[in-house]
Image (cartoon, rainbow, N blue to C red):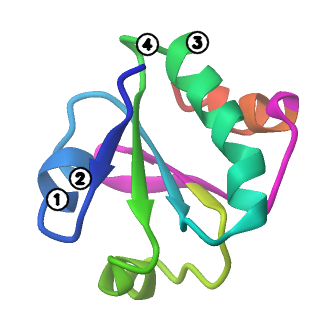
Amino acid sequence: MSEVNVTEETFESEVLNAELPVLVDFSAEWCGPCKMVDPIVHELADDWAGKVKVVKIDADESPNILMKYGVMGIPTLMFFSNGEVKERVTGFQPKKKLVKKFEKHI
């Protein structure tokens, strides 16, 4: 599992300047729905290994990134390609729905 924890300091290099498309998981320790999304995100990271980079951002530790991208609720999954947001999903979604939303950008 190659999930990377990203901070405000590493966001640009890990996400915006990444060579691969990046799935960003905005979550927090205390968030119940985030814990439900977590295993799905791990599966996607395995399924898309080598094709998509999967990173996690702690919402409490990165308020500036949340503000910049208008993240109002967590969990929020954002799919970046070439430094741009291509897709965004807020709240729990089953794996099939997430795959359908994100796969077209891979």
Residue bearing mark 4: 49
Residue bearing mark 3: 47
From the image, which quarter does the N terminus lie in? top left
Identify which residue, 87 or 60, lies in the foreground: 60
Amino acid found under the numbered disc labelled 1? Glu
- Is residue 104 found left or right of 3 in the rendered image? right
Residues under numbered marks 2 and 1 in contact, where contact means CB atoms less than 8 Å apart: yes
Going from N to C along the chain, the mark reached first, 4 or 1, is 1
Q: Look at the numbered disc 4 and give the secondary structure of its residue.
A: loop
x then y, percent, for residue 94: 87, 38
Q: Residue at x 68, y 33 (%)?
A: 39
The Cα atoms of the two marked residues, 4 and 3, are separated by: 6 Å
- Is residue 70 found left or right of 97 in the rendered image? left
The Cα atoms of the two marked residues, 2 and 1, are separated by: 5 Å
Mark in the foreground, 3 or 2:
3
Residue bearing mark 2: 16
Which picture quadrant has residue 77? bottom right
